[in-house]
Amino acid sequence: MTYVGPSASSAEMSIPPSVEDGSGRATVKDVITAYVGLTKPRVIELLLLTTVPVMFYAARGIPDLGLVLWTVLGGAMSAGAASAYNCVYDRDIDEQMRRTKRRALPRHVVTPVSALVFATTLAVLSTAALWYGTNGLSAGLSVGAIAFYVFIYTMLLKRRTTQNIVWGGIAGCFPTLIGWTAVTGSLSWEPVVLFMVVFFWTPPHTWALAMHYREDYANVDVPMLPVVATPRVVATRIVVYSWVMVVTSLLLWPVASTSWFYPVVAAVLGAVFLLEAHRLLARTKKYESLKDISPMRLFHNSNLYLSLLFVAVAIDPLIG
């Protein structure tokens, strides 16, 4: 399970000053902190937030605790492996970007070879944990998510096209499928709808943050949409994707025959998200400075939206 796109919610764990300025050797604690940072813990939190609620819905109530623990363990290691691979491959541009220059590899606290071994170990352990604790289908989906994130997004799309996080974002949708298959052992339309919600959520979420860090991406020639398009164009696309996302979220109601709770929450959350998206577009027409446009308002709203929507997914079967 992995997530595509930059995220302020995934801020890297800071490297201690003694290591950063060269005034002291890295302690065991420093190295452990660096390795944990490679996994991008905040991204893991976000991914598990879309995994566990789906397990509740698939179980139509409270799922087996042991199953949840194995899924969380395997999913966390899977996401950590993908993030660590990403850090190894992107270490050259990470050194030049203010958002990422404090990562372990740019600060030379961890060597690329050590990080690669660490990532591979996590990938193997995550697959074994999911295979043992859930089933082969969930384990296979996890491997597919790692491969998609590393080979399709990181190596193929990220540095070549403005569509990098649109199609690369598919990797971040896998947790909805993994959570469902961990409980049921098979796929159905319910997790596919939630898969598509995350798919359409990813571009507005990521483009808003990329607007804030536009200069970072421009300096390293990564063609994020805000680098090659005007803020108004970016905001317009954010509005379009936001509308499609909200409509898709409401499809779970007829597809899964939810109770009244989910569609009401989804409609309210969607209305708030759309309001913020349209406000962002309005600010791009009024202001020229990205500081005045304040794209981070939508970014933070997007995190809250996804979190509360999936909490509603978990609560709905308990009410129904």
Image (tube, helix red, strand yellow):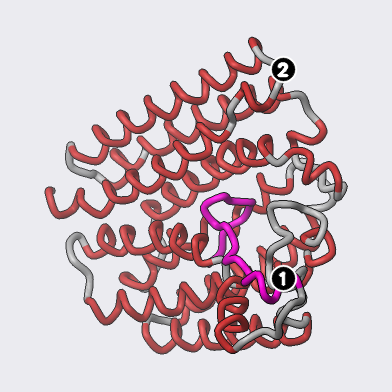
Residue that appears at 62% across and 76% down: 34
Q: Is residue 17 above or below residue 176?
A: below
Q: State the predominant SS element of the stretch in magenta.
A: loop
Q: In screen coordinates, is 312 left or right of 108?
A: left
Q: Residue at x 44, y 67 (%)?
A: 178
Q: Nearer the viewer, residue 256 or 1?
A: 1
Amino acid type shown at disc 2: Glu
Q: Position of residue 138 (x, y in %)?
A: 46, 74
- Amino acid under disc 1: Glu
Q: Is residue 161 left or right of residue 206?
A: right
Question: Where residue 216 sits in the image (x, y, percent)?
Answer: 77, 45
The image quarter in which residue 285 lies? top right
**Residue that appears at 69% across and 20% down:** 232
Total residue callouts: 2
Q: Residue at x 46, y 73 (%)?
A: 75
Residue bounds of the magenta highlight: 1-21
Q: Nearer the viewer, residue 286 or 156?
A: 286
Q: Is residue 4 magenta?
A: yes
Point out the tag, 1 or 2, that comes first from the N-terminus. Answer: 1
Q: Residues within 10 Å of mark 2 (few under 14, many from 20)?
A: few
Q: Is residue 14 magenta?
A: yes
**Badges 1 and 2: C-beta atoms under 8 Å apart?**
no
Say if 207 sits above or below 137 in the image: above
Along the line of sight, the residue nearer the viewer: 51 or 287 = 287
**Residue found farthest to the top:** 286
> Which labelled disc corresponds to residue 288?
2
Pointer 1 residue: 20
Q: CA distance from mark 1 to mark 2?
A: 36 Å
Please state the horizontal and vertical placement of residue 207, each as a whole percent of the image.
Answer: 64, 38
Q: Of discs 1 and 2, which sits in the foreground?
A: 1
Question: Which secondary structure, mark 2?
Answer: loop
